[in-house]
Image (cartoon, grey):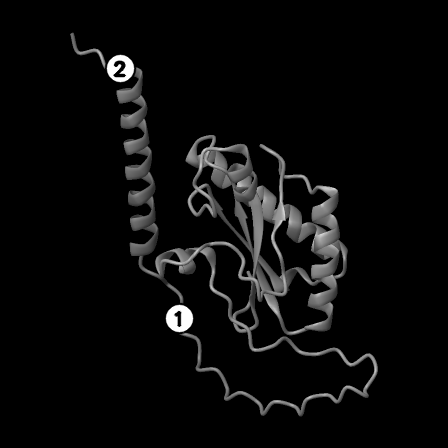
Amino acid sequence: MNTLTRKQKRSARSGLCALFLISSLALVTCTPSTRTTPPPAPPPEPAPPPSSPSEPGAASSAPNVRESSSLEAARSGQSSATPEASPLKEIYFDYDRSDLRVDARDTLKAHAEWLKSNASARVEIEGHTDERGTNEYNLALGAKRAQSAKDYLVTLGIAANRISTISYGEELPVCKDATEACWQRNRRDRFVVNSARPAS
């Protein structure tokens, strides 16, 4: 008589997955580090004077930009969508795919040009998915999507050490409706410009 319904089994599995994920994260964050503390960074050099508009071909340095990641935006109650003022726009993917569409390649070419003219800028590519599929599957798919964009930017001449990737899977959607139009908006890579921290 101890029969569980399909919904109860799924709920129990989801709970166990969440518990496993949380305990794994706790173990990783609680593991003592054997790294030594690096010496303090030298004081920053004075900024060079801005190049005048009459200097042809002068590459500008990245503006002093520090955009919020999707996680930081969600924690502060803001949308995880790319802000309008961001120089790098989102790219989108087809359902269950990580290959770049033609429109995504065109957007990435524009991103590469901006990154070339802002040589000190670093970017973190966030891979996102819609809600369909397991958390684990969607985290892996988001990672593949972010890596596809990074690989393409590298082929366009952007140094790999200026680009880092992270996957949020389905966890930080821009839209929460259960419609194809909404899911399409969530199947994306978001580009977070950060000129301060090194990429990994």
Q: What's under tag 2, amino acid-wise?
A: Thr
Measured along the vertical axis of the image, is residue 2 above or below residue 167?
above
Measured along the vertical axis of the image, is residue 110 above or below residue 168?
below
* Residue 188 at x, y percent in the picture: 57, 46
* Residue 114 at x, y percent in the picture: 70, 67
Q: What's under tag 1, amino acid-wise?
A: Thr
For the point 31% across and 27% down, the residue is 13
Tell me the quarter of the picture where residue 3 sits: top left
Instruction: Give the SS element for disc 2.
Output: loop
The furthest residue to the left: 1
How far separated are the C-alphas under marks 1 and 2?
A: 52 Å
Tell me the quarter of the picture where residue 45 sits: bottom right
Q: Which residue is mark 2?
A: 5
> Of the numbered discs in the image, which one, if any, rests on residue 36?
1
Pick the residue in front: 88 or 121.
88
The furthest residue to the right: 56
From the viewer's perspective, tell me whether residue 33 is left or right of residue 180.
left
Instruction: Give the SS element for disc 1.
Output: loop
For the point 75% across and 51% down, the residue is 106
